[in-house]
Image (tube, helix red, strand yellow):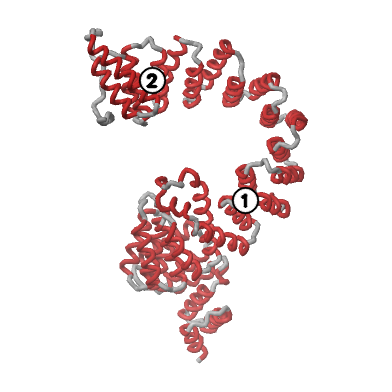
Amino acid sequence: MPTAFGAKLPTPPEGRRKAVSERKRMEQIYFFSEGKKRLFYGDANGAAYCLGRAIKSDPYCDACYYELSNAYALASQLPEAIHLARSAYKLDSANVWYALHLAQLCAGSGSNLEAQQLFEAAIAQAPRITDAYYGLLAIYDSRNLYDKAVQLLMQYRQIFGADEVNILSMQNFLLKQGKVSEAIAEVKLLIDQHPFEQQYRLLLAELYGAAKADSLAFEAILQAKDIDSTSYEFQASLSDYYRQTSNFDSYFRCLVQLFSNSQTPALRKQQVLGFLQQFPAIERDYVPIIDSLYALARTAYSYRQEGLYAAYLVQTDRIDYALNMLKLIVLRGENDDRLCDIFLNGQKSQFFSAHADESLALYGAWRLYLDLLLFRQEWELLEHEADRYLKMMPDKHKAFYIKGLSCFQQKNYNGALNAFLQAQKHSAAPADTAFLVRLYSSLGDAYFYLKDYAKSDKYFDKALRLDAGSYSIMNNYAYYLSLSNRKLKKALKMSKAAISAEPENPVYLDTYAWILYCMGKYDDSKQIFRQALVKGGDREPVMLEHYGDVLYKLKEYSNALIYWQRVAEKGGNSPELQEKINNVKK
């Protein structure tokens, strides 16, 4: 059979309907019936072919356009389906089913105003078609027309009565309007209809809680308990009540019951634990109980659950345990073919729909693992783990950047430069300005230590063009210029800007003072160094040595010796420092 899709779409002729011959009429009837049959069996292409033939036989057949629209909709070709639905509606605007079909297609394409008008017209013409009400209700919701939604639900109620869906929808829209008391009245009506449905009493408790009517909320929860005290929904509601009333001892006792309940979904447990992580002060007060909650939640393996536990260990200062947990998570993930396939193929992976959440959890665990190694300054291990990360994760630029940092800290400047250049090559998102600023600054660092000053300056300038207010980059750039005794006026200007922004920062003050030293302004340099030392710089060997250098230039040799010796006591035994000390002693 020829392919139907992709051909030019038929359009009804203008003017009055013209009669067709008996042969054409019989052809139209045959192809229309055949098209509907194929549509029933899900053969969208075959249905489109037959219905297109039917329209050729009778271009005025509104039902043919309607069914052909259904075929295109089945094939997910929405614009074409809408065009054909409009054609059917144009030929017979009195047909309410055509109006509803076109309204539903318009709603699906985001043409909400047109969909609203069509739904409203359909209800006015045929007020007993229930589908039209809930289609229109969804449009009102998307357009925040809550008053209209309530009016529509009242109209529905007058015709069909107040059923469960109607009452639940009404309380939902009343809540969106902030009418909590009216929403409570709706739920009470629902309880009258279904007195033994626990979920509605728990919903009532939730609404009372929103209205700050704590005693009434607790009463509703107790009524729910009388219906079923073992349900996880009741235990969850009671725990929420204790949390909202800040009764944390009772709250955590309820959580133990909730997590012990075999009915409680794993996702609910994860939501609770994720919520608790937002309040580390509370977590620290209840560590033994929360430990037991994690033990109860971890009965079935989940990357998300294990990642939550690792984050909890970090928040409770158990970094070593967290690192061990994360090592196990990433090792398991490395050997999980489903998740590796998702990282490789994204949404095209056959496992994406079933395991996308787990892949996100594994990604989060990897990132936390690398961040902790960075925090612990375990540079050699971090370099190794960055290589492992590169083999499976899609964001290569971040992995290369982390590898570059670890190489740099190990003074492997060539390795750092190569990794940073790879990060630049793989960075496919120029809009990620923050990352590029860090990357360009790091390239500036690497090139400086490799004594390629021109490229170092180039990358620092690129970083500052992206973020002209980055005072840390200004400070580093200025310091490097002073160390290489170049562009000292530019260095001084950048350093001034940094200390103007953060006048209490001893590192910035040290840079400014050292630039003054390089410019031969020893008295000014001394005054700034004294400020830096008072503000905490006296703990830094580099600043102490710099201050000694200034004092030496000012011929305060004994004072210079004192500061250089303090540096030596702190472990700063470089050959250059020892030579300075020996020269003064002579």
The answer to whether 496 appears left or right of 279 in the picture is left
Quadrant of the rendered image containing residue 21: top left
Crowdedness of circle 1 by 10 Å Cα count: few (<14), some, many (20+)?
Answer: few
In this view, the mark in front (2 or 1): 1
The answer to whether 477 appears left or right of 242 in the picture is left
Q: Which mark is residue 102?
A: 2
Q: x%, y% of residue 14? A: 23, 12
Q: Is residue 441 above or below residue 118?
A: below
Q: Which mark is residue 300?
A: 1
**Front residue of 18 and 211:** 18
Q: Is residue 400 above or below residue 57?
A: below
Amino acid type assigned to the residue bearing label 1 in the image: Ala
Q: Secondary structure at mark 2?
A: helix
Q: Earlier in the sequence, mark 2 or mark 1?
A: 2
Q: Is residue 558 above or below residue 15?
A: below
Q: x%, y% of residue 483? A: 40, 73
Crowdedness of circle 2 by 10 Å Cα count: few (<14), some, many (20+)?
Answer: many
| Residue drawn at the location 47% of the way across and 58% of the way down | 500
